[in-house]
Image (cartoon, rainbow, N blue to C red):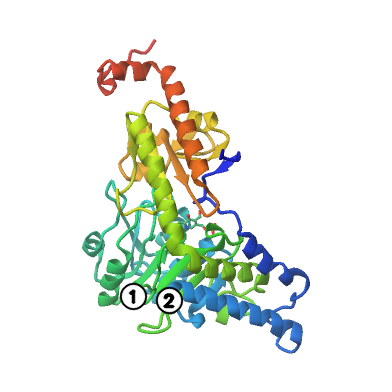
């Protein structure tokens, strides 16, 4: 069988909504269209029932109680509530003062964590941004060294969105619990793909998103622990007091129903999918590394998401490579800023040099990818890299044994 083009290998950016999810959502637009806040008629009750079923489905995937789930507009919003709402609730001093408390996070978090942390810095909190090791795994001992008497919150992602490295979340959670420190994890890339048990994993607050797990965009959830300890956060949105006051605004019933169904499907298919995708990723990596020289797989060799790989191809521009394999959707290790192409701050944060960061591709597989697509991609990537290297004088010099890092270039 040959692969059907184009191929989608960018599942860490977003996933295709599963048709079974869409099917579950459809009645919410035209049949069960009531406002779940309408407590005095059947249309409202029917919508509320669907929302509560979804809440149970989300809770069950996380090992939580359904009262611990707050629906949000995605992981960005969940992170904002957890970090800003958590810090303000547990602050040592009131707003307007300095030394309000210490927060620990990491330099390679998603912007949806880094930007709220920066905001809190401006508002009198002190933030430590851990410097990750080159494999991207944050360990409990690294966190322990950063904790202080006045630490009130630790926020660390479970799995990194660019390299898939998996941090020691249950161990870090245990450490925080021992010290009475609030622990939040951005589990956007983890939930639905890997087993999660918020109780055993010692998590107080967890963010997740529908569109990374075959559900719809614009809906997500925040888990807020209710027992041992009971966690509180300040609301960011004020208004109708929905979601027990944590998140005002009329509920996105179709989105929530879709998220619930997506969670149910992930729970059913997680084990077999994990194995299948790991097999495909390993094939992709082993074929590419055996057929090409000067390639590097970024992130920890084992502690990595099964479906994601980030590979640097020496002597090749990631952007040119992406253009050469246009029929395969992937991400590059560069980000467009207004003026230039910047190497990704995540790869830079890991200590990967600008050149290798610019030469890297992230390929993230998902439920709808097949082995034929992987086979096609292997050939396409290998051929494109070889063609681009044929045009590269630097690669020729490298092959002749010249260390190009030692060359002193002359300006004319
Ligand atoms: C690790 C991580 N956190 C947060 C987000 C933001 O999620 P959402 O698009 O649901 O706001 C993403 C998505 O790119 C992500 O990968």
Q: Residue 176 occupies which quadrant of the picture?
A: bottom left
The residue sitting at 48% across, 49% down in the picture is 365
Q: Nearer the viewer, residue 239 or 284?
A: 284
State yes or no: discs 2 and 1 in contact (Cβ < 8 Å): yes
Q: Quadrant of the N terminus?
A: top right
Q: Residue furthest top?
A: 412
Q: Is residue 65 left or right of 91 when viewed as pictured? A: right
Q: Is residue 389 left or right of 139 when viewed as pictured? A: right
- Give percent across and percent down for residue 110: 44, 54
The residue sitting at 24% across, 67% down in the picture is 148
The dot on residue 63 is 2
Q: Quadrant of the C terminus?
A: top left
- How many numbered dots are placed on residues in this image? 2
> Is the residue at mark 1 in contact range of ligand 1, meaning its CB lies under 8 Å from it?
no
The dot on residue 200 is 1
- Give percent across and percent down for residue 256: 61, 70
Say which label, 2 or 1, has the lower sequence index: 2
Depicted 39 relative to depicted 252: above or below: below
Depicted 102 relative to depicted 357: above or below: below
Element assignment for label 1: loop
The residue sitting at 36% across, 82% down in the picture is 229
Q: Residue furthest front?
A: 1
């Amino acid at each position: 069988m040959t692969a059907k083009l184009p191929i989608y290998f960018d599942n860490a950016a977003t996933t295709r909504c599963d048709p079974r999810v869409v099917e579950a959502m459809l009645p919410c637009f035209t049949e069960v269209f009531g406002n779940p806040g309408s407590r005095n008629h059947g249309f409202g009750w029917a919508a509320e029932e669907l929302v509560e079923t979804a809440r149970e489905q989300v809770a069950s995937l996380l090992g939580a109680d359904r009262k611990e789930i707050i629906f949000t507009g995605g992981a960005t919003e969940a992170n904002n509530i957890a970090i800003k709402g958590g810090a303000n609730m547990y602050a040592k001093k009131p707003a307007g003062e300095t030394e309000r408390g210490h927060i620990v996070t990491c330099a390679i978090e998603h912007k949806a964590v880094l930007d709220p942390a920066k905001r809190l810095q401006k508002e009198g909190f002190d933030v430590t941004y851990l410097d990750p090791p080159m494999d991207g795994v944050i360990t409990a001992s690294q966190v322990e060294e950063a904790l202080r008497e006045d630490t009130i919150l630790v926020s660390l992602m479970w799995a990194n969105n660019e390299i898939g490295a998996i941090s020691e979340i249950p161990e870090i959670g245990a450490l925080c619990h021992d010290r009475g420190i609030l622990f939040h994890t951005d589990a956007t890339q983890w939930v639905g793909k890997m087993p999660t048990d918020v109780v055993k994993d010692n998590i107080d607050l967890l963010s997740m998103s529908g569109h990374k797990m075959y559900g719809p965009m614009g809906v997500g959830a925040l888990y807020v622990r209710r027992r041992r300890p009971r966690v509180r956060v300040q609301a960011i949105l004020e208004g109708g007091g929905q979601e027990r006051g944590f998140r005002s605004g009329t509920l996105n019933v179709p989105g929530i129903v879709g998220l619930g169904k997506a969670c149910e499907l992930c729970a059913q298919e997680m084990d077999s999918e994990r194995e299948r995708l790991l097999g495909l990723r390993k094939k992709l990596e082993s074929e590419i590394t055996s057929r090409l020289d000067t390639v590097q797989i970024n992130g920890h060799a084992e502690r990595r998401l099964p479906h994601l790989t980030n590979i640097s191809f020496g002597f090749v521009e990631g952007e040119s490579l992406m253009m050469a394999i246009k029929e395969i959707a992937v991400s590059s290790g560069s980000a467009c800023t207004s003026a230039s192409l910047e190497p990704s701050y995540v790869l830079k944060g890991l200590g990967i040099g600008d050149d290798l960061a610019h030469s890297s591709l992230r390929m993230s597989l998902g439920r709808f990818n097949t082995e034929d697509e992987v086979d096609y991609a292997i050939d396409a990537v290998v051929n494109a890299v070889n063609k681009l290297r044929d045009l590269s004088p630097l690669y020729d010099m490298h092959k002749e044994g010249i260390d190009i890092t030692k060359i002193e270039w002359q300006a004319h």
